[in-house]
Amino acid sequence: MDKFRRNSFVKAMDGGDEVLSPYLFKVESADAAFISRRLSVFPSLIKRTILEEAFAKPTPYLRNRHILDTTSQLFKLLPKKLAHMFFGFDDDINLKAKECAEYCRRIVIDPSAIQFISIHHQVPDETKSHKNSKANLGNMPEKLGSDTELLLTFNQIHPEKYGNDTELLPAIDQIHPEKCGNDTELLPAIDQIHPEKCGNDTELLPAIDLVHPEKYGNDTELLPAIDLVHPEKYGDDTELLPAFDQSHLTDCYVDTKGLIADLTSKQQQTLYEFLSRYIESFGLKRLELNQTMKISGCIKRYSDKRWWLRKFRKVITQANEKAALHLNFINSKRQVYASNITTKNRIAQRLRNDELLSSSIIINDLGQKYTLKEVSDLNVSNPQIRKDELICRARGFENIAKEEGHEALFVTITCPSKYHRAFSKSGAPNPKWQGLMPDEANAYLNKQWQKTRAEFNRHNINPYGFRVVEPQHDGTPHWHMLFFIEGEKLETMQDIIRHYALEVDGEENGAAENRCDFKKIDSEKGSATGYILKYIFKNIDGEGLGTDKFGNDSVLVAQRIDAWASCWCIRQFQQIGGASVSVWRELRRIRIKLFKTDAENNSSVLEQARLAADNSDWQGYNNVMGGVLGKSKDRPIKLHYELNIDEQTGECLPSYYDGELTTKVKGLCFAGKAIITRLYQWRVERA
């Protein structure tokens, strides 16, 4: 009988979970409940990894402690409302973004909802109540265990009622009311499971049963309070929203511009505060108002699926990588450079982009038509053109160095061991790792480089060349830099770079040998461009390189590096010194000579720069533009900007969200005159 009851209990607990079931049968009922509660929200791969490591522990205490510590780390990466999207695919993220945007839009377009919010949600003074609510949560962690982050989403409807009265807070865990245990003193009238026990005390009801709103019967005045804990429940089931004007819901993507403009400033402020709290419940930061970002623009963003999609993609993709790093998935022995799910999502994103570009047509004033894919293949979006341009520029710098008698130096800078998750040879966890992520590692390198540049300026050192950022096997970035410099300044430059590269944890074992490496390039043995060529190819498409040092195919490696750079928003290539490449690209748009006579063309700086750019002569272009050491403000040719205007109507085209006037590149500015290089206005249509 006991075995039957136990099996029934476990079956009810795990809901038929194929990953959890075998493990739950091995433990006591209390442990099974704990394991199910901690792991049920995660995808199978995470559950399986945590369970395998936990059940390898020698005692039940250590097993449960491992599960608790690991899941607590993961819950910090994504809020509970998004925890089920760990290692999810982009289609799931897209659907979630659509639900959240639709939810916000329904509130914006419905006057009754705005009226309800205006009455029941007083705007706090500069969001003080919002800040106080977080402060109050920290005063009572002992009553809730370590899982206090759940409280941030509890009473979204009347948070001001609680103020500093923290005795009420533990009773309102909307997501896990069972955590209140048997402490019935904390549940005076708010029994989430049996609200009928509250009797006729209806004053408590509007902010309570967000789990089962249907229990209120026909009292539809309470329903616009909108379940902020589980808004996705509404979906397309508009029967759950009787207070909303159903006529507006026929098209949830109706333009909100006019509707927001009709609201009073007080209504807009109230709506902004309400929706800001909603987005914070997903772990996103509220939009801060400033001179360029208006309150109406913030509300438009909150109601736009594209805004939600960008935010969710970044947050969830980075959470996936952080989870993979915490679980030591990313290393030379398992998933090199980036996790499999992030790589798959990035490849899928590129395929979607190609499909969209191929199915969209761009048409100019003359009626010329091209697909966006054809246009995209003509610029640096095309990997082959991107490689060719980088090699052309690197070769141009090398030619300048030879002409000026400068030395070439190849530098590699690596992060301290606390930024590295795993050892490269074995893939085993690095005990010195402090939970620091690749974006934090790159920020560290950038900060040290800023100090280095400042010291360069104090010593009148002006190197020129390129920097390439690439991941090590565990996703930790390191920098490769190709510099050209006067020979007499070479040693001083090396000392400065070494000093700041070892400024942090420079005394640790192996730091002097591994964290900063210099290779002086002998032109008789090989070209400087050849040193950086491999890194350019490896980080773009990997063609022609064979395999990396771990035996992985270079083309697949390039895909993983692209996913890594996209996830962490890391710029892979950076020119140091030299003239503007943007001006170079604009000059290449001009295909004809600018003057009629050869004398004028030969004497014109503009024509000489155009000719050099048209012939892919980066050395000649830099010489015409004032040399590699010239300052940007002293360059003779600059970009020319104009207001973004619809040439058919003559109206200025405002920014999409805030209605601000915008500018765009229209050509070049030389000797106080504008040279227009973009002659046509284009429009995009679906094929």
Image (cartoon, rainbow, N blue to C red):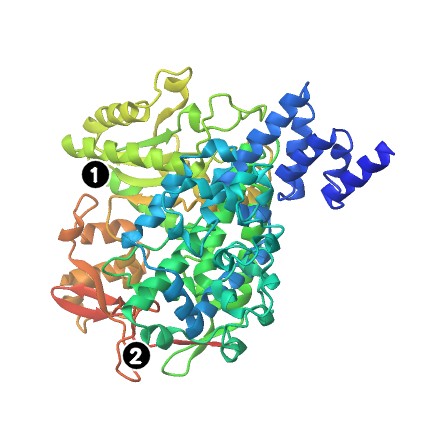
Residue at coordinates 39% horizontally, 59% vertically from top-left? 274
Q: Name the N-terminal-most of marks 1 and 2.
A: 1
Q: Quadrant of residue 323?
A: top right
Q: How many marks?
A: 2
Circle 1 crowding by C-alpha within 10 Å: few under 14, some 14–19, many from 20: few
x, y percent for residue 386:
42, 53
Q: Are marks 1 and 2 in contact (CB under 8 Å)?
A: no
Q: Inspect the image, locate mark 2, and give the three-letter code of the amino acid beneath it.
A: Asp
Mark 2, secondary structure of its residue: loop
Q: Nearer the viewer, mark 1 or mark 2?
A: 2
**Toward the viewer: 241 or 643?**
241
The residue that label 1 is drawn on is: 404
* Numbered tag placed on residue 492 in the rendering: none
Q: Outermost residue toward the left?
A: 672
Quadrant of the image for the N terminus? top right
x, y percent for residue 533:
43, 41
Look at the picture and state if 122 lies above or below 402: below
x, y percent for residue 121:
38, 60
The residue that label 2 is drawn on is: 646
**Toward the viewer: 464 or 150?**
150
Residue 406 seen from this side: no
Residue at coordinates 24% horizontally, 32% vertically from top-left? 451
Tell whether 211 sits left or right of 537: right
x, y percent for residue 141:
46, 33
Residue at coordinates 39% horizontally, 16% vertically from top-left? 508
Q: Quadrant of residue 367?
A: bottom left
Circle 2 crowding by C-alpha within 10 Å: few under 14, some 14–19, many from 20: few
Q: Inspect the image, locate mark 1, and give the three-letter code of the amino acid beneath it.
A: Glu
Tell whether 488 sits left or right of 574: left
